[in-house]
Amino acid sequence: MHQEKNSSSAPLRCQFMSAQGERRIGHLMAKTTWHNGRRAGFRGMVSDISQEMEAKARIQFLSRHDAITGLSNRIQL
C-alpha cells in the first residue's frame, strides 16, 4: 500500500443528530492513520457549525426580503 505522508485534506460538511435528538450540521476533518505501511483507519474531528449556517441563511434571507413583512424587496423584483 502507498503511504500518503503529505496528503492534503479538504473539509466535508456533514449532518448528524445531537444527543438531544436535534439535527446538526458539522464540519468534518479527517486524516488517514497508518500501521506498518498499511492504512489502518481514519482519525478526525467534527465541529458543529449549525449556528453559523443558520446565521448565513438568515443574512441571505434578510438581504432579499423586508425584515418586518417578509415580502421580497427591490433586489428580488
Image: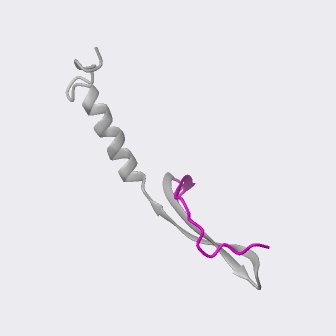
- Residue 6 in the image: above or below residue 55: below
Nearer the observer, 50 or 76: 76
Residue 77 placement (x, y as % from top left): 28, 14
Q: Is residue 8 magenta?
A: yes
Q: Residue furthest right?
A: 1
What stretch of residues is rendered in magenta? 1-22
Is residue 75 shown left or right of residue 45? left
Counting every numbered tag in the picture gives: 0
In depth, the one of 22 and 6 nearer the eye is: 6
| Placement of 68 over or under 5, stated as above or below | above
Please check the rendered image and state whether residue 10 is part of the magenta-colored stretch, yes or no: yes
Q: Toward the viewer: 9 or 51? A: 9
Tell me where residue 62 appears, x and y as whole percent: 26, 32
Is residue 63 depicted above or below 34 in this figure?
above
Could you tell me which residue is drawn at 62 percent across and 76 percent down?
5
Res 33 quadrant in image: bottom right
In the rendered image, residue 54, in percent from the top left (x then y), is placed at 37, 45
Residue at image position (56%, 65%) is 8
Q: Position of residue 16 (x, y in %)?
A: 56, 55
Q: Quadrant of residue 69?
A: top left
> Which image quadrant: the N terminus?
bottom right
What residue is shown at x 25% (from left), y 31% (from top)? 63
At 22% from the left edge and 18% from the top edge, which residue is drawn?
A: 74
Q: Is residue 70 visible?
A: yes
Residue 41's image quarter? bottom right
From the viewer's side, name the closer residue of 5 and 23. Answer: 5
